[in-house]
Amino acid sequence: MKFSWGEDLPVVARMTAKIRRDDPAEPAPDRDVVVALVGNPNSGKSTLFNCLTGAHQVVVNAPGTTVEVAAQAWKDTAVQLLDLPGAYSLVAHSPGEELTTHAVTGDDAADLVIVVVDATALSRSLYLAGQVGLTGTPVVVAVTMSDIAAGRGVTIDTEALAHLLGVDVVEVDPRTGAGVGQLAAAVSDALVAPRHLHLDAAPAADAAVHEHPLAQVDPRFADAEALFAWVADVQTQVASTPPVRPSRSDRVDGWLMRPWVGVPVFLLVLAAVFQLVTVVAAPAMDAVRWIVADWAGAWVTRGLDAAGAPAWVVGFVTDGLLVGVATVASFVPLIAVVFLAVGALEDSGYLSRASFVADRAMRHLGLDGRAVLPVVVGFGCNLSALASLRTLPSARQRALTALLLPFTSCTARLVVYLMLATVFFPSYAGLVVLAMYVLSAVLVVTVGFVLRHTGFRDLRHEPLVMALPAYQRPRLGALASSATSRTATLVTAAGKVIIVTLALMWLAMAIPVTGGHHFGDVPTADSVHGRATEAIAAVFGPAGFADGGAASALVTGIVAKEVVAGSLAQTYGSDDEPWTDGLRATFERTSGGHGAAAGLAFCVFVLVYTPCLATVAELGRQVGWRAATGSVVASLALAWTLAVIVFQVGARL
């Protein structure tokens, strides 16, 4: 199970109380033992957690991305193991480090901490271990990445390290399970007879002259220089290191981090991700939708007819529930592709470099470079962009980015732009489509600026600081497991909202409001849905398209934007004239002879108004339904305002 909290919650008290499932005041023997994993990002901590518990937590290779706390029972034991967010220091500079600090220093802290020491970054790991030791928490040290360090000519004397630290030190390889048995034995011994880190080489400092946050826990936290000296002394005694030589990753970064190389490569990578979202996933989505809605729907219809089910039951099951299931199922390949792509970029080590390259541009929105990936993915699909927000380290940054993503013009909207542009601007259709994307980018920047200076004034502007992991080949097994679990979680959460909403929409179209019709067998114009959209149509008078057909298309477009195009074609087409002529004639009539201006205003409204239902559901899950509802209302108001402005200006040109 997983727990995640906002930045201002009393993390450890809630976490350990939930795990222990009883009153913290009860005697210790009646309480579950809680052991926490603490370590730097990319130290192998999450891989070790999976190895010890058998869980399938996401294992990535980009620092600062583990913003959830996973809790799982250690295999074959009653010990509850916590995988805390990666941290470089207990002096918290991010929400993840705040969680880790509370878990080690809080009133209801873990019973024991396993400090994961990365053999390839010994000094950085020892610095964190020293801070954990200063809290007085019982400790066991697990040394990882020894094989990679050995490949670089670095060896660590674990026996000497154990002697200096005064605690058990176990060398483990989480990928193969080597050393896990010894680690379990060390933890068992430490729970019976707790042992604490020896920090004799780190003398206490005068707390009266320091204001270090962790000085309240131990005065020696106030003296960083003493801790650094201790780290250097320990490293000198336990590690043998060859002369420093540039690694392969260093040589690649020597070119890739240069702007004139890094920026083009970055754009090519983003283009590849965009192509995966728009080209690879799209046929799979269509195939899944056909299988569930058409093929399976035909069989369900035959079965219900054979069973003598009433016509309205057949309609509700096939056109209501089954269409909802098909809509949800069609998102599975899209989301899976996005998770696989993002996971591969993280696991390879490239995403950290991309964050640095894009950092300067994203700073203008109050975000760091890691936000560029979700924004770009949003131009392929808003839902998949929300799914990729886990690369952002801060809950506030994720919330701000999530509220901006609906303004990125997804490819589903492109179908509507092309449809309207070819009808009203046949010679300039390409320019109209380009203008929509330019407007989308302007809206993202403008709305971001407004939010940054209103509801997100508290968002701290901090430099992007992260260690660049070595390049490595992505682990296919971990990627597949991660994509599967995350896709299932997202689709399940969004699917409930989608299926219920589509079922309610079918009911609205099945209920007649005039005599002479039966439930489930009524023309759309004489249904509750039809009368409601006719009433809504009047709102679009100032925008030039006050027609029930246009309003109905926009309402159904809340389910999926590509439905707008199909609804318009179905509404305005007939046996006597093609839909293009019917649409043009209707817009000319409703706009007083300014059909082109009305068509352009309709495109603008489609760009800005409520995103698809799946996106709204995921937005509510990530930022809360209050914020999501406010976003929907604000986007409707902004869409109407911009559409009116475009029409009123266009009609006068």
Image (cartoon, helix red, strand yellow):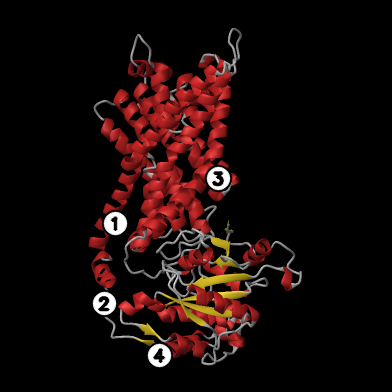
Task: Quickly name the residue at label 4.
Answer: 236
Secondary structure under the numbered disc 1 in the rendered image: helix
Label 4 with label 3: CB-CB less than 8 Å: no
Task: Quickly name the residue at label 2.
Answer: 246
- In this rendering, the answer to whether 203 lies above or below 508 is below
The x, y position of residue 257, in whole percent, is 28, 66
Answer with mark 4 or mark 3, whichever residue precedes in sequence.
4
Answer with mark 4 or mark 2, whichever residue precedes in sequence.
4
Q: Which numbered tag is attached to residue 307? A: none
- In this rendering, the answer to whether 332 lies above or below 21 is above
- State whether residue 461 appears in this view: yes
Q: Residue at x 50, y 90 (%)?
A: 164
Give the side of residue 642 with respect to residue 137, left or right.
left
Task: Quickly name the residue at label 3.
Answer: 620
The x, y position of residue 188, in whole percent, is 60, 77
Q: Which numbered tag is attached to residue 266? A: 1
Q: CA distance from mark 2 to mark 3?
A: 47 Å
The x, y position of residue 181, in whole percent, is 51, 74
Answer with mark 3 or mark 1, whichever residue precedes in sequence.
1
Q: Residue at x 41, y 36 (%)?
A: 607
Label 3 neighbour load within 10 Å: few <14, some 14-19, many 20+: some
> Which mark is in front, 4 or 3?
4
- Is the C terminus in the top left, top right, bottom left or bottom right quadrant? top left
